[in-house]
Image (cartoon, rainbow, N blue to C red):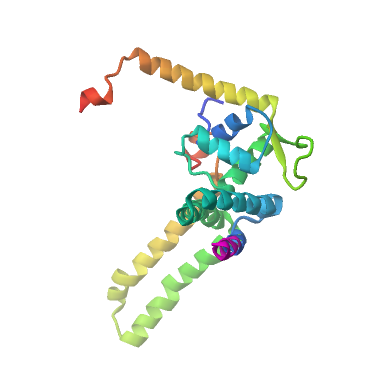
Amino acid sequence: MSALLTFSLRAYSAMLLLYPRELRRDFGSEILDVFREDLDHATSYRGFAGILSVWACALREFIRIALPAYAEDRRVAVPSILFAFNEAILTIPQKLIFTHRLSFQFILATALWPSLLAALTALVVVILGQQCPLFPLRLGPDSCSKSAI
Amino acid sequence: MNEPLAPAAFLILLALASGEKHGYAIMSEARALSSGSLQMGPATLYTTIRRLLDSGWIEEVSGPEGADVRRRYYALTGRGNSALHFELDRMRSIVEKANALKLPSPELQS
């Protein structure tokens, strides 16, 4: 069990690298300490099931905090959107035309529009992400009615 | 000031109402106060703590005598206390209005 706990701590500290830089800078060691205490407590009371529940919570937080933070980060979001546009407009249609000799109309219907739609969706998500802070203190119009877990 | 508090922020303020606490104690208390319905982990805890610190609703304080020096302790400020009481009054008012409606119990409806 102790090997599993050690592995869990190492995995969580690696996962922490993907959280927003400011959060890690201000509270990184504390977050890790609280995770360790939570893991110790859950293991002593519930054993392996306790470890699983702590990890389920950690993964849920990762999806809700770390991933949306990337969408808010222009350094990540802008290159991602440009890459998606580039793939949608240039690379994918060219490959399909020259490799598979498909007609442009067919590509437009099957590949181009879904890719463009995905890129536009990403753009909207980023714009909304800039306006809606993560974990607002208050719910309501100011916070885009986002609930904090 | 009229929008309800987010659940995590409300429970952290409520956990600190009984006195200064360190991170893990706040998380445990918040989970207990929500009867386990709030799945608060370390990242949610400190993301919310940071916002509460920025808003001046909680502050970092020196821990009690003999406390682990690595731990950071947090306490409710006057503004945080006001926000908590405002929220509690809002909730109380809703419950009073709901009680006045004399809603049938769920057992009777099924």
Residue A50 visible in the displayed image = yes
Residue B5 image point, x, y percent: 53, 31
Quadrant (top left, top right, bottom left, bottom right) of the N terminus of chain A: bottom right
Residue B19 image point, x, y percent: 67, 29
Asked if the magenta segment contains residue B79, the reply would be no
In the shown orientation, is residue B23 left or right of residue A124?
right
In the shown orientation, is residue B28 left or right of residue A117?
right
Question: Residue at 69% across / 36% down in the picture?
Answer: B74
Question: Residue at 20% across / 28% down in the picture?
Answer: B110
Between B27 and A89, the one nearer to me in the picture:
B27
In the shown orientation, is residue B97 left or right of residue A127?
left
Between A34 and A74, the one nearer to me in the picture:
A34
Question: Residue at 57% across / 66% down in the picture?
Answer: A3
Q: Which residues are magenta?
A: A1-9
Label the magenta part by its dominant secondary structure: helix
Question: Residue at 42% across / 19% down in the picture?
Answer: B95
